[in-house]
């Protein structure tokens, strides 16, 4: 699984048009399909699909299909599996990643009556208007040849939000943005048991379950009787051992499969539990001399 937009900055199929930290505008272009990529969205994102098709499957087992000429708004904190299909030519999209401050700045400039405080939906999908299409085309024409400074980034993102507001309708869009700031509580036990193998920090799990970090730690101990870090280490290393018992695989693949994006750290943690490195463990297993391990 990858963290986005962070991992996209080094992707050869992605051009950075504007960037300020993890707030950015990117242009993605693929000539072949990209299937089954797992990702965790660290910032709010609007994806404007120019060609091809994007298919998203979320943690809640919802499928979102975005065709050329459509756009989708995904809130921060969403985990999904994505397929990008070139549809015989290319897949292209313009991606806007932005933070809560940008949303607050937008909301400060609009007026709406009483807000519906129900939970935010997982996404908001709708057709591109002529104004949005013209806006994205102009953006690529002006800033697509070289990376621009960050001074225009927030202005361009706010401009997009205003165009989307006109498309969706004042009340619906403003309520959607407002509800993004409300916590969405999930059952910790169920969520952690299904997602312990994702390369996420404790702070990320707190956000995804709709809690502050302190509340998450307290609720987590109530459910599991230990700290999140200790539990994650135990679960991930038990899974790593089980995967090696089932068959050999590279240390890099194993590390990523159980939620470690730092391979050296994974090897050290594995050695603490088994007394062996993953490669030594595989060799011992091959020689029918697998040591007992208590993860």
Image (cartoon, helix red, strand yellow):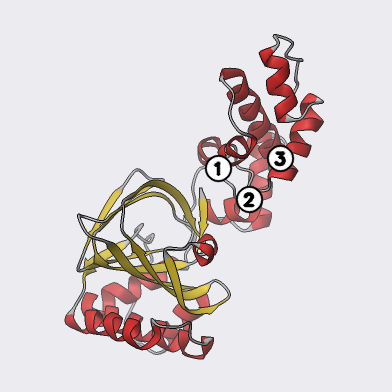
Relative image position of residue 100 (x, y in whole percent): 50, 74
Using residue 202 as the reference point, say whether residue 94 is left or right of it: left
The residue pinned by badge 2 equals: 216
Mark 3: secondary structure: helix
Give the crowd class for mark 2: few <14, some 14-19, many >=20 residues within 10 Å. many
Mark 1: secondary structure: helix
| Badge number at residue 188 | 1
Give the crowd class for mark 3: few <14, some 14-19, many >=20 residues within 10 Å. many
Relative image position of residue 165 (x, y in whole percent): 28, 80
Front position in the image: 291 or 88: 88
Q: Find out whether the residues at labels 1 and 2 contact each other: C-beta distance under 8 Å.
A: yes
Q: Earlier in the sequence, mark 3 or mark 2?
A: 2
The residue pinned by badge 3 equals: 266
The relative height of residue 100 versus residue 264 in the rendered view (above or below) is below
Q: Earlier in the sequence, mark 1 or mark 3?
A: 1
Q: Find out whether the residues at labels 1 and 3 contact each other: C-beta distance under 8 Å.
A: no
Q: CA distance from mark 3 to mark 2?
A: 24 Å
Picture quadrant where residue 157 is located: bottom left
């Amino acid at each position: 699984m990858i963290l986005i937009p962070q991992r996209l900055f080094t992707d050869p199929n992605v051009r950075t048009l504007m960037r300020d930290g993890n707030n950015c505008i990117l242009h993605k272009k693929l000539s072949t399909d990209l299937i089954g990529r797992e990702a965790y969205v660290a910032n709010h994102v609007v994806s404007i699909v120019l060609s091809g098709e994007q298919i998203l499957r979320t943690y809640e087992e919802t499928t979102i299909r975005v065709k050329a000429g459509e756009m989708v708004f995904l809130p921060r904190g969403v985990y999904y599996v994505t397929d990008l299909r070139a549809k015989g030519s290319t897949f292209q999209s313009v991606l806007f990643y932005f933070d809560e401050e940008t949303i607050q700045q937008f909301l400060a400039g609009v007026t709406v009556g009483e807000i519906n405080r129900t939970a935010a939906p997982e996404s908001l999908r709708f057709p591109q208007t002529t104004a949005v299409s013209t806006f994205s085309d102009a953006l690529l024409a002006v800033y697509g040849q070289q990376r621009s400074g960050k001074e225009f980034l927030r202005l361009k993102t706010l401009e997009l939000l205003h165009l989307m507001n006109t498309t969706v309708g004042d009340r619906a869009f403003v309520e959607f943005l407002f509800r993004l700031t409300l916590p969405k509580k999930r059952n910790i036990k169920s969520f952690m048991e299904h997602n312990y193998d994702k390369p996420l920090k404790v702070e990320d799990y707190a956000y995804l379950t709709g809690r502050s970090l302190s509340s998450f730690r307290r609720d987590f101990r109530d459910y599991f009787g230990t700290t999140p870090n200790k539990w994650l280490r135990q679960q991930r290393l038990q899974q790593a051992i089980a995967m090696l018992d089932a068959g050999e695989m590279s240390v890099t693949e194993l590390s990523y499969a159980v939620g470690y994006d730092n391979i050296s750290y994974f090897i050290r943690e594995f050695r603490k539990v088994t007394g062996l490195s993953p490669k030594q463990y595989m060799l011992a297993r091959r020689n029918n001399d697998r040591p007992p391990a208590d993860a």
